[in-house]
Amino acid sequence: MASSFNVNTRTEAGYAVIETDGYLNGPTGEKLAETAKDLMNQGYNTLVINLEKTRLVNSIGISILIEIIEYFQEHGGSVHFCHLTPVIERTFKMMGLAQHAELHSDEASATANL
Amino acid sequence: MAEEKREVTLNIPIHPNMELVAAHTASILAEIMEFEETHIDEIQLAIIETCINAFEHSNSRDSKVTVTYVLTNDELALKITDHGTGFGAEQTELLTGEARARAMQKRGWGLEIIREMMDEVEIDSSDEGTTITMLKKRI
């Protein structure tokens, strides 16, 4: 049972990548949002969130992801997601997240046109 | 031959991350029943959303939620009960049309997600508490 949550951050030319590991809910979503905003403050307004090691995202976690998307859009940036499980992808689409961020199968396709 | 029925009951305290205990138990039981991986994820998310709803909105008098898992040959039934103040019918209605299409609605998705993930969902709520009964069929 994954009750811990970790983020790993990597920066590339023109974009940053956050890899999540664990259950994404309210508190861990806030941790992710802080990391994302730090990257924005460092000048990275294009963000890739890699969810390969996250199997569960609850609705509060998704609402925080939406806030991250809005924050990046307000600052002229964009957010891209990759490695979603089928259930996470379906939930993202239900809650409208997919209308405002791109969903990709893997990191290579997420970054292909950045 | 009579259908075999097995039952597991958990009493979980209303405390951060306790929903994962209920979800993990469901995952183990669904694996035993040989549910496919995506269906196990659906069950886990439904139970997480149900528990979170109870944790956040029930005002439970005993600060706990009871989760009962009933396993039959082809179905996993989940019954989640809190002893809170209940909620009205308007809070259990499905989003449709414009409401569903409204972009970027952030909160209040719990029941919608539960219904999306499970095959059957019943809600019984009164001022004595709320019981949500959910069913997932092994296809």
Image (tube, rainbow, N blue to C red):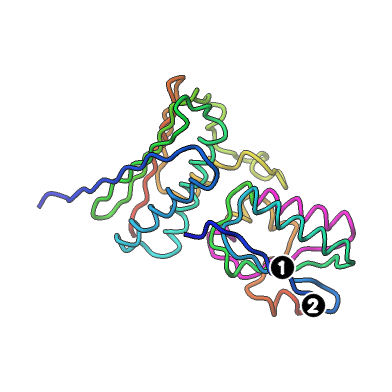
Tell which subunit mark 2 falls on: A
Give the left or right position of residue A28, taking residue B119 as reference: right
Residue B42: percent from left, percent from top: 47, 55
Local SS, label 2: loop
Q: Which residue is mark 2?
A: A113
Q: Quadrant of residue B39?
A: bottom left
Q: Which residues are magenta?
A: A62-90
Image height check: is B20 above or below A19?
A: above
Q: CA distance from mark 2 to mark 1?
A: 18 Å
The answer to whether residue A74 is magenta is yes
Chain for mark 1? A
The answer to which image quadrant residue A113 occupies is bottom right
Residue tagged 1:
A18
**Which residue is rendered at x = 64% and y = 48% of the image?**
A26
Q: Is residue A109 above or below residue B99?
A: below
Judged from this view, the residue extending furthest toward the left is B1
Query: Would you say the residues marked 2 and 1 are in contact, meaning their CB atoms lie under 8 Å apart?
Result: no
